[in-house]
Amino acid sequence: MEVNQAMEILQRIAAAYTKFDLTGDVGKKRIELWIDHLSKLPYEPVLAKVDEHILNNRFPPSIAEIKVRQPEKNEFLAKQKEWARNAKYSPKR
């Protein structure tokens, strides 16, 4: 996700939870830490998890509670399809 999207998520959390303060020295460090971690995650799924957390929890989320596991790319399937396409054009023995 982009930095502006990460800030949008932080502001959303801060708006929902008064104890999630983004001001002062601690707030500055909190912003840096969260942006560092959020920038590695996809925006839409994290936003959905934040919204779900806000609806179901009285306390602000931790990064671990809203992170989204991203599926690893399976390049084997793409290679297998390519092999199958190329096999059609290979000379028969």
Image: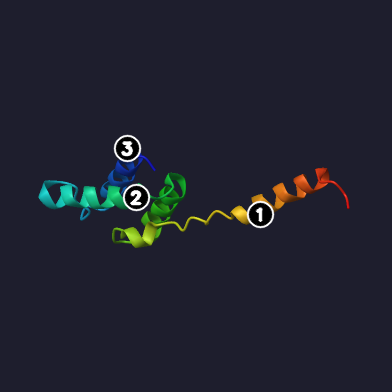
> Is 21 placed left or right of 92 in the picture?
left
**Residue farthest to the front, as pictured:** 93
- Kind of residue indicated by mark 3: Asn
How many residues crowd mark 3 within 10 Å: few (<14), some (14–19), many (20+)? Answer: few
- Judge whether 86 appears above or below 19 on screen: above
How many residues crowd mark 2 within 10 Å: few (<14), some (14–19), many (20+)? Answer: many
> In the rendering, at what x and y percent does residue 88 appear?
82, 45
- Kind of residue indicated by mark 1: Leu
Q: Quadrant of residue 60?
A: bottom left
**Residue farthest to the left, as pictured:** 25
Which quarter shows the N terminus?
top left
> In the rendering, at what x and y percent does residue 48 appear?
45, 50
Q: Which residue is mark 3?
A: 4
Q: Earlier in the sequence, mark 3 or mark 1?
A: 3
Q: Residue at x 32, y 37 (%)?
A: 4
Q: For mark 3, give the secondary structure.
A: helix
Q: Earlier in the sequence, mark 2 or mark 1?
A: 2
Asked whether the residues under the numbered discs 2 and 1 touch, taking CB atoms below 8 Å apart as contact, a structural biologist would say no
Q: Which residue is mark 1?
A: 77
Q: For mark 1, give the secondary structure.
A: helix
Q: Residue at x 88, y 49 (%)?
A: 92
Give 19 or 36, whichever is nearer the viewer: 36
Give 75 or 63, whichever is nearer the viewer: 75
Give 22 or 38, whichever is nearer the viewer: 38
> In the rendering, at what x and y percent does residue 9 appear?
33, 45
- Kind of residue indicated by mark 2: Leu
Tell which tag, 2 or 1, sits nearer the viewer: 1
> In the rendering, at what x and y percent does residue 11 appear?
28, 44
- Circle number at residue 38: 2
